[in-house]
Amino acid sequence: MSRARRKGGHRTRQRDGLRLSERRRSRRLGRQDHRAKETKKGILMIGSSVFLVAAVGVFAFTRPTIELDKNNCVIGQPIPGHTIFLIDGTDKIDGDYLYRLKNSISFKKDNLPISEKLTIVRLSGNTEGKPEFKELFSKCNPGQGSQFAGVTESKMKKQFQWKKGFGDELNAALDDLSNLKVGASSPIIESINRLTYKRDFGVNTLNRRLILVSDLMQHTDEFTHYKNNYSFSDVRNMGKPYTGIPLDGVEVDIIYIRRPKIKNFQNVSHEKFWQTYFVQNGADLAELR
């Protein structure tokens, strides 16, 4: 091999070696740049986490505390909904109707949205035909454990509070339904009118529901169903409190107690009267059942 070729080969290896060195240096700089970017990303993530935790802490510290009154209702806010069971206690309720009533109240208790109110009112009438109310129960739902998200321990605490401040008292009211006092009159229409004057059952309450448990036999000196040939037009001509009752948007459900001793009065005309009464006053009436 000649000297010229050896010198040329040496120059080639130098050129090849220079290119290899440059590639190694480029890869090294690339790795350093990647580590720098990863470090910067980690710092940003840690900073974001610290900021998020701090923000949550500030929110938890500064957000207004929800205060409840003695009936579990939020102070300073209108209740989002109100369900009233109006129980006609002017005659005895027993057997299948009492069973249905208790089941209906229990179902509503277990499915009542948080902060909505549940009221149970027993109706009777005095000798003058004026309604006499006994409020057996009236409270807002503070929420059962299953209605809250979170750890099991928090749910158990909420369930205990609900049972103590809502469930147990409602169960006691259910037991009291077996001891309804018979009244001297049945001012059903007057009683419905009186309910609309309740501040928490007025037109400002969004979701209003009325469950009427009654044989629907209106009986006062002014108007009675214990006669024939009556119609809604008779009541309409009497004016207030028999007409103009603000039931707009109220969902009405009726547990219609049929009594064998008055079956001649509880006829098609009787049902039609009440259907017309509720519709004419703006209520959303379900079927009599």
Image (spheres, rainbow, N blue to C red):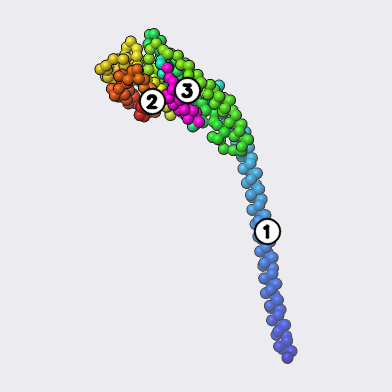
Q: Quadrant of the N terminus?
A: bottom right
Q: Identify the residue at horizontal 33%, vertical 18% (top origin).
A: 262
Q: Select label 2 or label 3 by which is in front.
A: 2
Q: Is residue 19 left or right of residue 252?
A: right
Tag 3 secondary structure: strand
Q: Report the amino acid beneath label 3.
A: Thr
Residue 163 in percent (x, y) is at: 57, 27
Front residue of this view, candidates 149 and 36: 149
Question: Mark 2 or mark 3: which comes first in sequence?
Answer: 3
- Residue 92: x and y in percent read 42, 17
75 on left or right of 17: left
Determine which of the numbered discs, if any, sits on residue 250 in the image: none
Q: Is residue 158 magenta?
A: no
Please state the extent of the stretch shown in magenta in the rendering: 92-110
- Foreground disc of the pair 1, 2: 2
Of pointers 3 and 1, the one earlier in the residue sequence = 1
* Residue type of the residue flagged with mark 1: Arg
In the rendered structure, find residue 35 and report the number of the disc placed on it: 1
